[in-house]
Amino acid sequence: MSETVGVVTASVLNLRSEPSTASAVRGRLPRGTRVTVLEPAGAWYRVEAGDRKGFVHGDWLTILDDAPASGFLHERRDLLSIPLGPAAADEIRVEPGFSSTERQAARTWNGQGGLLGALSGAVSVPAAGSVAVLCVESGGRGFAADGRMIIRFENHHFWKWWGKDHPEIFDEHFRFHSGKRWLGHEFRASDGDPWSDFHGNQAAEWRVFDFARKLDETSAIRSISMGGPQILGSNHHLLGYDTPREMFDHFQSDVRFQILGLFDFVKGPGTTSPMLEALRRGRFEEFASRYNGPGQAAEYGGRIQGFVEAFEAVRPA
């Protein structure tokens, strides 16, 4: 983050010696002051303002991205060649007394910690946050036992991309809650079949997805949340993919692209973003609101916090 610039938004912001309101004040920065951000420190940033260095609270600093990077993480060959798992010395030994949350965090790290650790350095996000997001979104898994990518078919998104132009066909096979559109998802293959809930069963998710693909493949791919990070196919352009199918093929080919896709989505093509800053600073409800939408931000944010704490409790020093 050495080239990242921040702008003070408070009328006057204290520059402190340590990331704490109890520490000494080294200076006072008026609104509009530009500082160089040296590194994140939880909810704080270590910054350089002229000839002074110190810490400021992130709530009153807006991060700019004046020199965006050209390209995305999934295009970096060095990240594609890093061992997926951590070094043996960094693995977490799963103990009988671990809680289910601790076991899941440990399994996610032991399977993907090599790449997650490298990405933590590349984008200045603590590894605990990366592990936690993957655990919440997909249980830390990118693929089901049959080798197919973990997906979630979203009826209301398929309505947006295809169904509203073909309402009679859509209504025969798909439905969702009219108020809370992310709820009440049901499917039936033909008019005489009973309606069934298919979420939580990967075989059923793929059955519905494959049915939708026959109606319109591009719209169907736009309407699924993919892999470990559970990113909608309609967001393909935010990850640097030209088409939904290109994103789908990459995510299906290797879990690496799913993990890199998580950070490409959070970061974008530049060096930072509001979503990335929220994850860096541990503002998980704000992150969840931007990542999943505001409807369930408190729930998702709390779950991410829980996995962060679980991972930090079991990871070797």
Image (cartoon, rainbow, N blue to C red):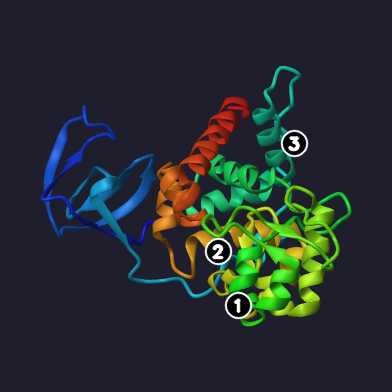
Give the spatial CA distance, label 2 vs label 1. Answer: 30 Å
Which residue is rendered at x = 62% and y = 82% of the image? Answer: 165
Residue picked out by circle 3: 88
Say above or below: 110 vs 220: above
Front-most of 148 and 168?
A: 168
Question: SS class of the residue under badge 3?
Answer: helix
Classify residue 186 by image quadrant. bottom right
Q: Residues within 10 Å of mark 3 (few under 14, many from 20)?
A: few
Q: Residue at x 85, y 64 (%)?
A: 192
Seen in the image, is 299 located left or right of residue 80?
Answer: left
Q: Is residue 248 left or right of residue 5?
A: right
Residue at which label 2 appears = 264
Q: Residue 101: in sight, yes or no?
A: yes
Q: Is disc 2 in contact with disc 3, using a CB cutoff of under 8 Å?
A: no
- The residue pinned by badge 1 equals 164
- The quadrant the C terminus occupies is top right
Residue at the image point whose x is 43% and y is 64% from the top = 271
Position of 271 with respect to 101 (left or right) is: left
* Mark 2 crowd level (few <14, some 14–19, many ≥20, 10 Å Cα): many
Can you give x and y, in whole percent of width and height, for residue 160 in the image?
A: 58, 73
- The Cα atoms of the two marked residues, 1 and 3, are separated by 52 Å
